[in-house]
């Protein structure tokens, strides 16, 4: 056999394993990023709907405007309904739902609202 006079430079098994682990980690991050970006549009609509629904709920409670109404934006349709709650006169069920333009429900928030009683003054003289 021929004896080697020079030491050959080569990768050790540990270096190869470390390189493979680095490639695996980078592939995993790339896959996760791709999956998250592919659902970005749906998540963005949900975030927009959450913001709009929250602001409508706040505005309705602040202004005591408890009427049924539909609000249409460029990509979302908001439907606000007010119903009696368990036949109690001063409690109402305020339901605000968000739909896509294709009538697919994005989200819905429901709150029980206490409406102040209207008192009348009788002037009997």
Image (cartoon, rainbow, N blue to C red):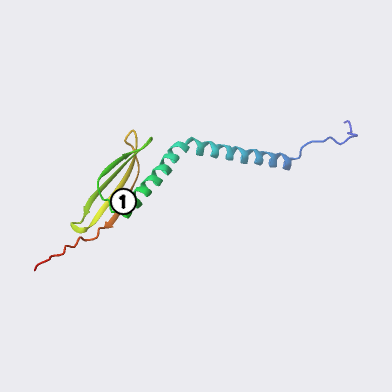
In the rendered image, residue 10, in percent from the top left (x then y), is placed at: 79, 36
Q: Residue furthest right?
A: 5
Element type at marker 1? helix
Is the residue 68 above or below the residue 111 in the image? above
User: Can you name the residue that lies furthest to the left here?
Assistant: 125
Image quarter where the C terminus lies is bottom left
In-front residue for pair 57/32:
57
Front-lying residue, 50 or 60: 60
Corner quadrant of residue 120: bottom left
**Residue 70's image quarter?**
top left
Where residue 52 appears, as percent x and y from the top left, is 38, 45
Give above or below for 65 relative to 2.
Answer: below
What residue is at 55 percent from the left and 37 percent from the top? Answer: 31
Which residue, as the protein is rendered here, is positioned at the far top?
2
> Which residue is tagged 1?
60
Who's the residue at 69% across and 42% down the image?
18
């Amino acid at each position: 056999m021929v004896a080697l006079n020079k030491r050959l430079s080569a990768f050790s098994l540990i270096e190869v394993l470390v390189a493979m682990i680095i490639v695996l980690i980078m592939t995993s991050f790339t896959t996760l990023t791709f999956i998250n970006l592919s659902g970005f549009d749906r998540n963005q609509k949900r975030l927009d709907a959450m913001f709009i629904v929250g602001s409508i709920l706040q505005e309705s409670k602040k202004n005591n405007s408890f009427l049924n109404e539909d609000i249409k934006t460029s990509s979302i349709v908001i439907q606000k309904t007010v119903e009696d709650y368990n036949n109690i006169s001063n409690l109402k069920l305020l339901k605000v739902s968000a739909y896509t333009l294709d009538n697919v429900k994005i989200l819905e928030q429901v709150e029980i609202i206490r409406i102040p009683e209207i008192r009348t003054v009788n002037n009997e003289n």
